[in-house]
Image (tube, rainbow, N blue to C red):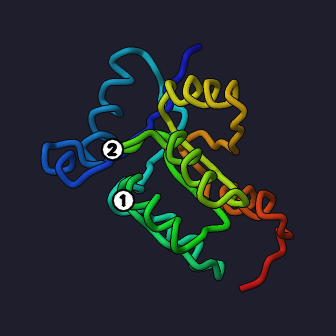
Amino acid sequence: MQTAVIYARVSSREQEREGYSIPAQRKLLNEYAPVRGLPVQQEFIDVESAKNPGRKEIFQNKGYAVTSRYCASDRIVAAKSVRPHLLLSDVMLPDLNGVHLAIQVRNLVPDCKVMLMSGDPNASILLAQAHERGHAFEFLEKPVDPDELLARTERLLGMHSSRQN
């Protein structure tokens, strides 16, 4: 028997105003699935938006210093002065894809660890192309569980998962 998994996400305030709010998406999808004979097995809601990341608070609550920028070009400028230990980015960005961003940041800060994430199936193509050119990055598929994100971050940075604030 086939089942449905609902994934609702809004990436901008404009989308929300245009009727694509999380509640509107859930309502539409919960009405659509039964009509198609698909019982809903699970629902995922990504409250993260490209302009308003919630992950910042997750890391700050664990004692990390976080610098947040909306577009890739701002992240590159910030990397020059901040010299980050970790770049956490979506693969799909408004002005440059996250793979190219990661390559540019690593050129500026060679020791910077990179974790990319995406829910877009085309992301795997970009990651494979980068890998063929000698660039390997940690990757998480969205939706991302906050505990997994923290655990993978700590592993990538070489920290113990029992990290205290």
Q: Name the residue tied to disc 1.
A: 70
Residue depicted at x 55% and y 16%: 2
Q: Position of residue 22 (x, y in %)?
A: 31, 48
Residue depicted at x 81% and y 59%: 155
The N terminus appears in which quarter of the rendering? top right
Q: Secondary structure at mark 2?
A: loop
Q: Name the residue tied to disc 2.
A: 94
Q: What is the three-letter code of the residue carrying label 2? A: Pro
Query: 127 and 64: which one is in front?
Result: 127
Q: Position of residue 157 (x, y in %)?
A: 77, 64
Q: Position of residue 149 (x, y in %)?
A: 66, 57
Neighbour tally class for label 2: few under 14, some 14-19, many 20 plus, Cα within 10 Å: few
Task: Decide which of tag 2 and tag 1 comes sooner along the chain.
Answer: 1
Q: Position of residue 34 (x, y in %)?
A: 38, 23
Residue depicted at x 57% and y 56%: 88
Quadrant housing residue 163: bottom right
Residue at the extreme bottom of the image, as rendered: 165
Query: 154 and 61: which one is in front?
Result: 154
The C terminus appears in which quarter of the rendering? bottom right
Query: 76 and 71: which one is in front?
Result: 76
The answer to whether marks 2 and 1 mark residues whose Cβ atoms lie closer than 8 Å is yes
Q: What is the three-letter code of the residue carrying label 1? A: Tyr
With respect to residue 123, does 113 lie above or below?
A: below
Neighbour tally class for label 1: few under 14, some 14-19, many 20 plus, Cα within 10 Å: some
Q: Report the side of 113 relative to 33 (left or right).
A: right
Distance from label 2 to label 1 (Cα)? 9 Å
Q: Secondary structure at mark 1?
A: loop
With respect to residue 119, does 58 lie above or below?
A: below
Quadrant housing residue 158: bottom right
Residue depicted at x 39% and y 44%: 93
